[in-house]
Image: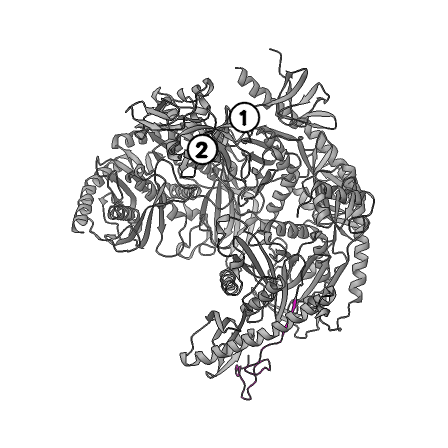
Amino acid sequence: MPVDHKRINGPEISIPYQLFDKLNTKSLKTQFSEIVQPNGTRADGRTSTEHRKIFLKTGVVSQAKGSAYIELDQTKVIVSVFDPREIPNKTDYSSKGEIYCEFKFAPFSCHKRRLHQQDAEEQQFSAIMKQALESAVFRHEFPNFQVDIYAMVLHNDGAALSAAITAAGVALAHAGIPMYDLITSVTLAVQGNHLLVDPTLEEERLCQVPLFKEEENNHGIVVLSVLATHEQISQFYQSGYLSYACLSSGIEMLTNAAKDIVTLVKKCLVKHVIKSVRIVED
Amino acid sequence: MSKLKSSCKLGILSRPDGSVLFSQDETTVVAGVYGPVESKANKALVEKACVEAHFRPKSGLPGVKDRLNESIIRNVCEAAIATAMYPRTSVVVVIQEMQNNGQLISCALNAACLALLDSGIDMKCMFAAVTCFIHKDESLVFTPPINEDQVKAMFMFVFDSVEKSIIASHTDGSFSVEQYKDALSLCKEECANMFDFFKKSLTIK
Amino acid sequence: MALCEAEKTFVLHGVEENFRVDGREREDYRPIELETNIVSHAFGSARLRLANTDVLVAVKIEVDVPYPERPKEGKLEFFVDCSANATPDFEGRGGEDLAIEISNSLSAAYKSPEVFDLTKLCILKGHKCWKIFVDILLLECGGNLYDAVSIAVKAALWDTRIPLVKSVTVDGNNVDMEVSDELHDCQKLDVTAAPIMVTVCKIGEQCIVDPNVAEELCSVGAVVIAVSKDKFSTVLQIGSGSLHPQTLLECLQMGEKVAQRLSEALTETLSEINPNKNQDVGFLK
Amino acid sequence: MSEQYKILHPVKYFRDHLAHKIRPDGREFGEYRPIVVNLGSISTADGSAIAKVGRTTVVCGIKAELCQPKAEAANEGFLIPNVELPPLCSSKFRPGPPTEQAQVATQLVADILKNSDCLDLKTLCIFPDKLAWCLYADLICLDLDGALIDACVVALMAALKSVTLPAVQYDPALDNKQVNVQERKALSVTNTPIATTFAMFDDKILIDPTVDEEDLSTSLVTIVVKEEELCFVHKPGGCVFTEEQLLKCVEESTKRATVIEEIIETAFKSL
Amino acid sequence: MSSPLVCLPGQRLCLSDPSHVSGQGTYERGGYIYATLAGVVDIVPKDNVQIIEVRSSGQETLVPSQGDIVTAQIHTITQQFCKCYIKCVGDKVLGRQYRGILRKEDVRATEKDRVEIYKSFRPGDVILARVLPITEAHTYQLSTAENELGVVTAHSEHGGLMVPVSWTEMQCSKTFVKEARKVARVVPESVQNDVK
Amino acid sequence: MSKNRELLSKIGLRQDGRRADELRRIRCKLGVFTEPDGSAYLEQGLTKVLAAVYGPHQVRGSRSKAQHDSAVVNCQFSMAVFSTGERKKRPRGDRKSTEISIHLRQALTAAIKVELYPWTQIDVYVEVLHADGGIYPACVNAATLALIDAGIPLKEYVCACTASLANNDVPLLDVSHQEEIIGGPTLTVAALPMSGKIVLMEMSQRFHVDHLQKVLDKALQGCKDIKSILDEAVKSHIQDVGSSTGWASTT
């Protein structure tokens, strides 16, 4: 690792201790059957289509124009949005503004320590976030400028990207940036015949590789973001190995789950509006 | 208690507007001052000059530690320079470490003051930095002990030449309030010598 | 390139009529030229021209140490470089965003063990493995980059020959390996499941494949679909627009169908390549 | 109207407030903002804490990894603090490498750790010259509203105290290490340094300044107190302080330190 | 006062017809009016038409646009132009300051060729100006070629606050030295702005 | 490795069988791409280079770059990561690439009639696909072809060539990668061969000043030879293009 002159550097090589754990010899298949029952009940007692409890709060960053904090049980993400600013390295006129997204895992948010610089996965997630939010925002209201959106994952226990997109939608509304619609996002993990909405990190990990033979080798992760009122999909991402049948039923599950979240997002924002109206009246 | 031997050579560099080779005991630095120069558009301040400090370690690229030194040097110089006289310009102070024997920051600050004086930039006051150490046996001295393990704490103070008030303070190790007071008054006495030295150096020039 | 409203309408009407600006139907591709083994000092290479899109792919192989958390697997890495030859906008770091987007989509598409088996690249568990660098050089951009890149990558991997390891000896922490000196002693990679990407573009109410630059500008949204055998290995929405769920499903169906046809055509083309024929290849043709 | 006044003539706005013996956020000069400490909310870290000083929020997560000790300090482990000021926390920052402010903060926090001697690095050694713990303490500021160092130190100390390390069996002959994740032990943190920042504006000294106050002030002082001792008096320049003023600040910070220490204690008790 | 009607982005507010028109904070799609902001619905009647508007809760996010009257602070002056930072649009404070440029020929409406920048503005002055059509990406072009536009607050070389004494002059309240400025005719609204 | 790896064998043959004053085979093609205003591909031995020219067009980026009396020539040198034996980490941005970019600009600015296009910019991008010694000369030669393909007026061809010194006596022409490794000083010259003007000269290591003249002469001779090869390629290209449009047959 090259020496970072702008930080304090640790020893050249250090290894996570988890690698030397008294070996966990259980096969992935048994691990999976331990956390997901054949009928789809999961380790935390949820059914396969059940979303985790969401806690959502606006206005957590006083220095930002808009901000939101979201918890999906253990997964914790904070997002802040700033006033439009000049687009760096751009001189020609453009009639539409731009959205800049930066998605970052905190160094301590995952099992393995993350480095301070953005890695490929974070860059990809940033691009997906941008894709999701672009069609939700009225970009011609701020021509020549870009709105910065920063998401920081403090604790990753699965579905961090979805949490960040949903929170970013709330933060944008909180910032008073004109939007076409509210946006919500949900993740799905697939393993064989099991389609698990809003997976935990453990479930995500076990859906990276096929555990079942032949016809049931479907596995993968799907992330989908929906604009609520207009029933539009603003972002879709899938990785893994899925058949059309599996994918199409997954999309249906996800759109339904995303619709359910909208109520929560609405509640949170209405609370914010009423609060600020009260302050003005007082 | 022995006083520190200081020596300096003003104007040793031709390119900067002011420069000095300064050593205090065994610690030596070279300081150069450029300014006032035109500053970059994004750094220019409407009502005053922008002071920049660059600290270069003896070898290698500057790291986080040098960044802290830079911040101290910049803030101290900013307090002393009559920045309001030079709006929309930059004053750049560059310090190159040559040899470090324990009181690097105070040596760098004194060198910065001399270089500023050499450059002829208007200043509100002079400043002098003094470092003192507490030994393990609780004695207060100016010369850094040979063995670092012997030091219990280090104090660095910067005083202004007008009221002998404190411009900056920086410490290392832990100590009691009484010790801090003692060190402060000791350094305050010593700083007069430093100012004398500055005046003498300038008159010789 | 910028299109005015009238031009856009013209393109749109063409798509509606199933008779596109360049005479194609909605599911037609432009002509594709493919050459393999054109970079002599690489382990495998391919150059693909899809109309004006020009992609050069070279595969390099190094010996590396496996990731400690996955000791039984080798490594596969994609690197995309957008050459400024394609457009001055790519000068310096200008093409980096696009390059990262493409390389990320490739990594995602090749991630599943069903698609590409990394365990085959392992030489000695936990100590030695092959690391495959797939370097993609974009020389000209004439639209539909994802498709072109994915086909070229598949062809280059097909062309790749991994040196045969004759023996591996372990001595304490030191691992010695001996690679066969014979030039022809090598093994090929299994690329039957390597994904083909198809970009399905929504223009007006219809979906098309292989959009040219003008069509890309008219599109409100597009979906990049990576198909491996009969399954989807990656699906990625691109562009700034949004899609109705029904449209998304239509796109997926169309993508799968087209990818199957492309895949068949590619297999056929590759099987026809005669390694012994030596002729002027590459840019001199 | 006051908002426009504030943005066009910030100094006058501030001075007008102070003339009425009140700070723009309604506090008195010697009044500090409420402090909240939240412990162990991040289970992926080996120790974590969130500290809020007023609106300034800093989250600290400590992750332990195994490494070889340095040759010159064969029986010591590592504690690597880094302060991150991501663009998320304030509109002042852009994406990219750490700003100067972040680097200075990192060094200050590292200095405070070293000066206070609160954690003996020797306790992090598992086997001399072979194996030691490296604790990466990452401090991420989520909301920057002044007194960054104060919040960082509180978060760091609370997180350090909550760190538990698994038991390690090391066989030097075979260089074999085995970790028992279930069997965990807390670190022995010997003392709790507490930092207090003061800002000076027109001869008035304000404790625990907000970011607006820091920007307008002519001088800042950070004083760190541990138990009965001082371990850091940092004034990086700016306008002058008299001896009396500086000693007054020391006195104030000693008082505040006991209060904050109690807050951290209570947080641990309620855990 | 009746409880306000809260709405959220994407919320359908009403049918769009000749008597209901989409106003600020709303958009029209497929014959309906939708909200773009989280805030409160406001119906403004205007010549038999109801304009549906949404007022944002908290501070709305906006950037200066063509025709707006803005408050700016002069940063640098040259012979040809002066650069300034736009801080407010109308009576709304901006979250971020934006760069503006005021060219010599846009200072005054008359006798344009006799304008001299240094006799009109000095760094630090607070001015009112109108935003001209946007041509460059990063900088707003401004104009003060109206009676109501120009310097509203300024400090003399000695630091004293100055009061306008004519169209072209201001006087220091401490030293009574007169300095040349392009003075704005103060309308009540902007009086509050700087005299407070 | 064999010990007797000499640059020149006793019978006067080089490692790859060439004679001392023999160039490597040069093959080239103009107009390989459609998007750029001019493009060319050039092989010099195993070294393979692509060049593309855009312009003259409006100055991009900051307008202050524009010059009132001449066009701005902007060059970017880049090497494909797979172009070298050991894989490169980055295609450009390292010190060597930046240096070659600057040298390229110097050589090309000398040949282009820049005064014809004030306030404009000409972009020249070269991409090395295979590096086997003499990268810089190959880039210059390819760029010249691309400029001709783009129809940009040149004072004359600008050609570059390397030369070395074997056995401390015999000058060698057009050094390959193998020969670069074995050692021997490399002299790189970019010249306007018709007028005999040198626009750029660079030496990799020292050799005796007495030898400079003959090595330089050899390199300049190389430039002239290359010029005639390029000239041939340009003529045949124009024949091809011309015959397809029908006007070439009229002459």
The region drawn magenta spans F1-29
In the rendered image, residue F5 lying in the magenta stretch gets the answer yes
Query: Based on the displayed image, in which of its 4 quarters is residue E178 positioned?
Result: top left
Q: Residues within 10 Å of mark 1 (few under 14, many from 20)?
A: some
Q: Where is residue F42 in the image (x, y as percent from the top left)?
A: 62, 68
Q: In this view of the protein, can residue B195 be seen by the observer?
A: yes
Q: Name the residue under label 2.
A: E112
Dot 2: element? helix
Dot 1: element? loop
The residue positioned 33% from the left and 30% from the top of the image is: D200
Q: Eyeballing the image, is C212 above or below D201? A: below
- Residue D195 vs residue C226, the one in the foreground: C226
Q: Where is residue A174 in the image (x, y as percent from the top left)?
A: 58, 28
Q: How crowded is mark 2: few (under 14 residues within 10 Å), some or many (20 or more)?
A: few
From mark 2 to mark 1, how far is it between C-alphas? 38 Å
Does label 1 lie on the same chain as label 2?
yes
Q: Which chain carries label 1?
A: E
In the rendered image, residue B17 lying in the magenta stretch gets the answer no
Q: Residue E59 carries which label?
A: 1
Q: Where is residue A152 in the image (x, y as percent from the top left)?
A: 56, 39
